[in-house]
Image (spheres, coloured by chain):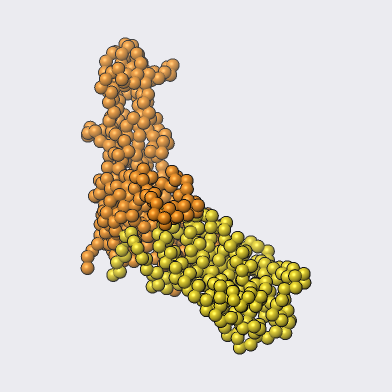
Amino acid sequence: MAVLVIEPRTGYVQVGWRELWAARELLYFLAWRDLKTRYAQTAIGAGWALMQPLLSTLIFTLVFSYLAKVPSDGLPYPLFAFAAILPWSLFARSLERSTLSVVTEGGLIKKVYFPRLIIPIAATFINLVDFTVGLLILMGMMTWYQVLPQWTVLFLPLFVLVALLTALSVSLWLSALNVKYRDVASVVPLVTQLWMFASPVLYPASLVPESLRWYYGLNPMAGVIEGFRWALLGKSAPDWTMVAVSLGVVGFLLIGGVMFFRRVERTFADLI
Amino acid sequence: MSNIAVSVTGLSKRYRLGTTHAQDGSLAGALTRGLRRLIGGPSASPQPQDTLWALRDVSFEIKKGEVFGVIGTNGSGKSTLLKILSRVTEPTQGRALIHGRFCGLLEVGTGFHPELTGRDNVFMSGAILGMKRQEIARKFDEIVAFAEVEQFIDTPVKHYSSGMYVRLGFSVLAHMDPDILIVDEVLAVGDVRFQKKCMGKMEDVGQHGRTVILVSHDMPAITRMCSRAILLNKGEIVQAGPAHEVVNHYLHAGHIQPVVEWPDPTQAPGNNVARLRALRVRSEAGQISDVIDIRKPMRVEIEYDILKPGQMVVAQFGFNTEEDVIAFIVNDRDPAWYRRPRPVGRYVSTAWIPGNFLSEGTMVVGGGIFSEDPWHEHCDVPRAVGFRVVDPGTRDTARGDVTGRWEGVVRPLLRWTTEHSSL
């Protein structure tokens, strides 16, 4: 019979893959609950999920394309913008929601044990639903502008995954910090806003000088968004050095984030 | 294989009281401290006065199949112990070994979302407790039937009554089939009939070789259900042993005494007419006792001095429950002395209380001396002595075969008659 040992943990804390894997159904249930309850008692329900990226695209097109004449790699600007706003929203919503998730689920954390890592993971991956709906709209736009996807579309899932992992890698740190320092919750919207301007959402990465491209890649979302546009719209292949640097940064943040989260999660119930 | 289900050794939990360090919880404070540590300055370690030991060096063992009670006042460390055993929080020192599938839940209905239907919540709550979806699906009908919410299973639980909510929550928990189950005050909620059902389910669990840790304020429940118990006070075990002994100890620690005496007349309550000297609780046989068998008659006596001749006085007792509800008030109606002037001297008046009359639980008694016409108080000491009424579980009481909580300040065993005729 299994023996459970409860004692103070010191030093390096195991990730607990087996436990995490055993709780995969909980991941599904948490996401499912979120979906079922998020739009309860709203009139247009999931329509809200689309409102923001669509409005942003409209405004960006007006400001950056008509007024500022920002180039768009030879693509119609609305398509160019929306193809970036979509993965960006996926990332930003995931980051925000996941950062707040641990405190939001404080009621559960204080009452019952389950692998805590499930919480930010669920809060990240749940955003795939809104993203999928947005993707359908993007398909519609592509049909309208008669831009058809190439073989490169096979890379799309990869970049979506990297967007999610980027959000997770950062929010693992932030969600854990937010338990003790609620300042984090106020900082995140600020961070995402600045981060957007540091990513090729409104402008093509080709505007960034070649010599700085490597540093630009330190922002994982730069690689993701460029890659996303390339995979779907087929224009201007991303700078692969930049993508490689991005992947490296995500991996580094992710491993560190998991370790940090596991280290501090034992204090969650006492601090929330 | 050993027959131990839970073994706890030297378990301790320290909390830091952050209030004294305002900078502790802010990012700025943490950054300053981090910087100080980085440049090798003195790091502020927690001072003893900033810490609270919610649990200190607690050790015990629970055998397989045992129903084990944990009692103590609020803040005694019960919840902390529970939190550690259910892995919600981590101990500061010590260790606990748990053998078998374990289910710890600090609150019935955890994981319920008000917007979700009863059906959805059963799955949600089950998943949080670690059940597989198939397992929940298999037991679903049983869970719903036990909770008696079949009609409302597709209604959002925000429309549930609190009773329905708790019933469904407990039902999920009870159907997890754990080897070890922790239940915290679950029986304090829900109606009496369902409490009885829960008790039945838990006793059922106990008899199947499963282990139950019951944390409760409901002392009769602890005495009835648990074989052994521990009493916690300020984070430490003050007593461990057979449940009824530990419960007794706990009740004594609550300053319930069967006797109060005023040996010094100058300190005694009273006036120039009457002076109180003692109040005592005695068993039927006359022994001073603070534990009374619910079936047996008992007596309460008041000893007093009459200092002025020719006074017509009556003694009075007020019986209150632990929650300070007045159960009843009785005046001395001994025909030998009622409406008769009394000579100076010492008197002992005794009120006889029949068996099968009081309810289980604590009774607190106050006494006083009065004149009736006109009404005048000479002395009155409320809540002076107390005693405990226990149901021995022999099934010849008003309780009969019923287990679980039972409301009411009195519990008379009445004469019942039945008329029967054929249809």
Q: Give left or right: position of B152 versus A85.
A: left
- The tint chain A carries is yellow
Q: Give left or right: position of A162 versus B208.
A: right
Query: Residue lying furthest right in this view?
Result: A66
**Residue B72 appears in the picture as rendered:** no
Residue A163 position, x and y percent, is: 56, 73
Q: Is residue B369 above or below residue B411?
A: above
Q: Nearer the viewer, residue A64 or B132?
A: A64
Q: Give left or right: position of B171 versus B351.
A: right
Q: Is residue B5 above or below residue A254?
A: above
The N terminus of chain A sits in image quarter: bottom left
Residue B379 position, x and y percent, is: 37, 21
Who's the residue at 46% across and 64% down the image?
B125
Who's the residue at 23% across and 63% down the image?
B3
Q: Nearer the viewer, residue B336 or A106?
A: A106
Query: Residue lying furthest front in this view?
Result: A211
**Residue B410 appears in the picture as rendered:** yes
Q: Nearer the viewer, residue A70 or A178?
A: A70
Who's the residue at 60% across and 61% down the image?
A189
- The tint chain B carries is orange
